[in-house]
Each structure stands twice: as structure tokens, then as C-alpha cells.
Image: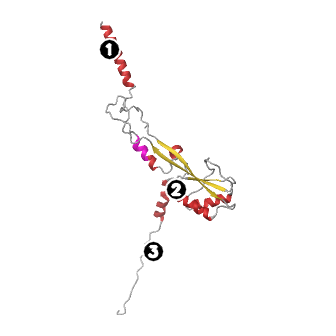
């Protein structure tokens, strides 16, 4: 009788521990790793505008339309501008590039695939814009102080990843990073410091004294 009791108690204890190990009760944190489940999600949106070409580029009226469209889109750093031209006319590209240059931007290479067909005699300008957001934040799903899994809180990572997604200049850098040009901030700042240190003092030539005489002397 005693042996049966001990076996039953041990079985109940094992089942109880097993149920706690796989517990997914609402409000109880279950992420036992240090990697946040709230990661930035990068999305790309393509904006298109079709312009009429006269064969030798874009007319001034079409260039003004393009400039107004850029202003409406609030063109900014990180946007990629491309031209979809079936004729691959260099004059059309130069006309678009002239407008783009006013905003301190450059044209990229091939245009991405966009819905619809580019009719003959028209040029499609594509602005590709990426954005980064962290979904599900803030997350206050942890409603219990009980933490049987030694897990992180439900909102873990929302602050850091949310701020990173909001402040990054080019959201695509969160996916593939950016190319290194070889120039660093230290190298650029040292140029200004060296110029300041090597400059000759303003008083190196002595002090000029202006003598004034009065008629009474």
C-alpha cells in the first residue's frame, strides 16, 4: 500500500512539473531567450508617376509636374529614384535627373517592377521608399508576476528596437547594412583639427599702432 502511494505521488509530481514547463497561460512570459520577439519590420513602397515625353526630353511643364510631385512626397534621404523608359532615351533621363538634382538626390539604376504598362511616349518615374516599424509595441501582455520559465518580459526590446527603427536614416540598413567608403568620422574631423592647429596666429605679424595727432599739439 505504501509503495503504491509513493508511485502515485511521484507520477503526479512529474506531470505537474511537465505541465509547468510547457505552460502558456495568458499573461505569463514564455520567451526564455535574450533575443526580443519584437523586431523591426522593413517595408518598401513604390510611388509612380507617368510623364509625357516629346522625344527630346521632358517639356518644362512636365518637369514642373515632377517637381510638384516630389514636394508632395516630401522627398528625403533614403528614397531611391529611378526611371522606367521603354525607349531608354538619354534625353528623358537627363530631364528627370535635372529635377532630381535640385533636391540633392541621384538617380539609381534599373527601376523596380511596377503594376501597369508604360505607354509609348511616356516616361515613368518611380520613387521607392522604405519604412521600419516594430509591430505589437508597447506589449503589456505580461499580467502576472509569476515567471516559472525565467523568461523576459513581454515588452522586452520594444524601446531599443522601436527607437532604432524610428531614428535610422535609411531603413534598408537594418537588412543589409551600408557599404564602407573607407572614410571615417575621425578622419574627417581630424582635417578640421589639423587646419586649426596649423593656422598661423592672427597676431604673428605684431600689433599695428595707429598714431593720431591733433592740431593743438
The mark nearer the N terminus, 2 or 1, is 1
Q: Tell me the element at label 3.
A: loop
User: Of 198 and 87, which appears nearest the observer?
Assistant: 87
Q: Position of residue 183 (x, y in %)?
A: 53, 53
- Where does the magenta region start and end? 157-163
Q: Is residue 136 left or right of residue 78?
A: left
Colour setup of the view: secondary structure
Q: Which quarter of the picture shows residue 21?
A: top left
Asked whether residue 123 appears in the rendered view, the answer is yes
- Local packing at callout 1 (Cα closer than 10 Å; few below 14, some 14-19, many 20+) is few
User: Of 182 and 114, which appears nearest the observer?
Assistant: 114
Where is mark 1, residue-wise? 9
Where is mark 2, residue-wise? 73
Q: Which mark is residue 111?
A: none
Q: Which quarter of the picture shows residue 60?
A: bottom right
Label 2 – label 1 distance at C-alpha: 70 Å
- Local packing at callout 3 (Cα closer than 10 Å; few below 14, some 14-19, many 20+) is few
Where is mark 3, residue-wise? 205
User: Residue at 68% across / 61% down in the picture?
Assistant: 54
Amino acid at each position: 500500500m505504501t509503495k503504491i502511494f509513493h508511485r502515485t505521488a511521484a507520477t503526479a509530481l512529474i506531470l505537474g512539473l511537465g505541465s509547468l514547463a510547457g505552460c502558456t497561460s495568458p499573461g505569463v512570459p514564455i520567451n526564455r531567450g535574450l533575443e526580443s520577439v519584437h523586431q523591426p519590420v522593413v517595408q518598401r513602397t513604390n510611388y509612380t508617376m507617368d510623364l509625357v515625353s516629346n522625344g527630346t526630353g521632358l517639356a518644362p511643364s512636365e518637369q514642373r509636374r515632377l517637381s510638384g510631385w516630389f514636394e508632395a512626397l516630401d522627398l528625403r534621404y533614403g528614397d531611391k529614384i529611378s526611371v522606367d523608359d521603354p525607349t531608354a532615351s538619354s534625353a528623358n533621363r537627363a530631364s528627370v535627373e535635372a529635377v532630381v538634382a535640385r533636391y540633392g538626390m541621384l538617380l539609381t539604376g534599373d527601376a523596380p517592377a511596377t503594376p501597369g504598362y508604360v505607354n509609348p511616349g511616356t516616361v515613368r518615374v518611380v520613387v521607392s521608399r522604405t519604412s521600419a516599424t516594430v509591430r505589437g509595441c508597447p506589449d503589456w501582455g505580461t499580467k502576472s508576476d509569476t515567471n516559472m520559465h525565467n523568461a523576459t518580459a513581454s515588452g522586452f526590446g520594444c524601446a531599443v528596437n522601436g527607437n532604432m527603427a524610428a531614428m535610422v536614416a535609411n531603413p534598408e540598413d537594418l537588412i543589409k547594412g551600408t557599404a564602407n567608403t573607407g572614410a571615417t568620422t575621425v578622419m574627417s574631423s581630424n582635417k578640421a583639427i589639423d587646419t586649426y592647429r596649423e593656422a598661423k596666429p592672427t597676431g604673428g605679424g605684431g600689433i599695428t599702432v595707429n598714431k593720431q595727432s591733433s592740431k593743438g599739439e
